[in-house]
Amino acid sequence: MALQVVIEEKNNASFKRYKYFNWTPGDHTIHLLDFDLKPVVAYWLGGGYVRSTNPDNPQEILNKKIRLENPQNFRNIRGYRPAQRRYIFRVYDKTVAKICPECGLDTKVEIGQTYPSVCSFCKKGDLTRVSAAPINDVRIVNCTVALVEQLILVDKTTLDENGNQVGIENLDLQLFIVGRGTNRQTVVKPGNICPIPISFDLEPLNVDNSIFLVSDSEMNDLIRGISLRDILLARSSKGAIEEITESLNTEEDVVKKKIDELFS
Ligand SMILES: [Zn+2]
């Protein structure tokens, strides 16, 4: 009898990984590519976003304890991390940038400044040899409900000459970003009317590559101060490490928790 073995292989080769949108202070031009936006409940822990399938996960238990012990000022207590609603979606980024020849990440020019000569992400790529051009590629946005509310507003209020809704799918969007981290403010305005700039069908977006699903014991480790990077290293998942490294480099700035709290 012949041995029949089916070896299941993860077909990672066809899985397209996208880079993250780079929130540089300045003007950006994007076009939305995902229109069915659903929130993901996440926690900022260990230098990245994580989620849990357990409603009574260790962070929620800790939050509860902190709220009970500090009913007045629980928000200011170290360790208190409310769940945040994050939105993950893809945009077509038309912003002019220099693509690093070493790491492939994009450097956008900041208001009133010139391009740095060396890539700030990998500290290796020589950007003086690269010319600036529209990125014209897919980028992942990981944002708060506040930004999504602006998208809804632009969608509703941008009308054609007959007073009909243009539809956000037919619009470029201008993002005006000021400041970084907790001070970052983003204003979304309608840009040119134009069709969706890419014709290929996008695969469904895998949110797990932006917001990592962790077990209760991993979450306990994160709460104790172990970095998400180390947790993922322990899983020895090379792909995940690349993801988190990139996500830490270019995703929204570190502690914008305060803004999220206002809307969570
Ligand atoms: Zn680089």
Image: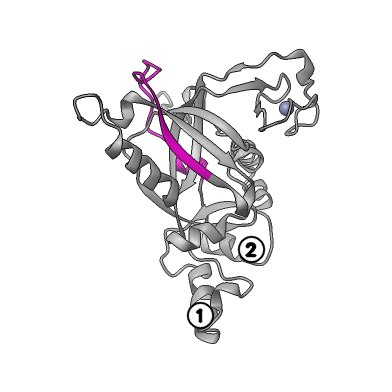
The residue at label 1 has a CB less than 8 Å from ligand 1 = no
At label 2, the amino acid type is Asp
Residue 223 higher or lower than 134, as above or below: below
Residue 130 higher or lower than 62, as above or below: above
Residue 249 higher or lower than 86, as above or below: above
**Left or right side of 251 for 202:** left
Is the residue marked by circle 2 packed among few (<14), some (14-19), or many (20+) residues within 10 Å?
Answer: some
Front residue of 160/171: it is: 160
Residue position for label 1: 67
Determine which of the numbered discs, if any, sits on residue 41 in the image: none
Residue position for label 2: 221
Quadrant of the image where one finds ligand 1: top right
Q: Please say whether residue 163 is visible from this viewpoint.
A: yes
Which residue is drawn at the image coordinates 61% and 52% (left, top)? 183
Q: Do tag 1 and tag 2 residues touch (Cβ < 8 Å)?
A: no
- Label 2: which secondary element: helix
- Label 1: which secondary element: helix
Foreground mark, 1 or 2, reads 1
Q: Which residues are drawn in magenta?
A: 186-210
**Left or right side of 197 for 227:** right
Front residue of 40/254: it is: 254
Counting from the top left corner in percent of width and height, residue 215 is at 52, 59
- The answer to if 49 sits in the magenta stretch is no
Measure the C-alpha gap from mark 1 to mark 2.
Answer: 21 Å
Counting from the top left corner in percent of width and height, residue 105 is at 65, 27
Is the residue marked by circle 1 packed among few (<14), some (14-19), or many (20+) residues within 10 Å?
Answer: some
Counting from the top left corner in percent of width and height, residue 250 is at 63, 38
At label 1, the amino acid type is Arg
Residue reaching furthest front?
Answer: 161
Report the quarter where the N terminus lies.
top left
Which residue is drawn at the image coordinates 66% and 33% (left, top)? 111
- The answer to if 202 sits in the magenta stretch is yes
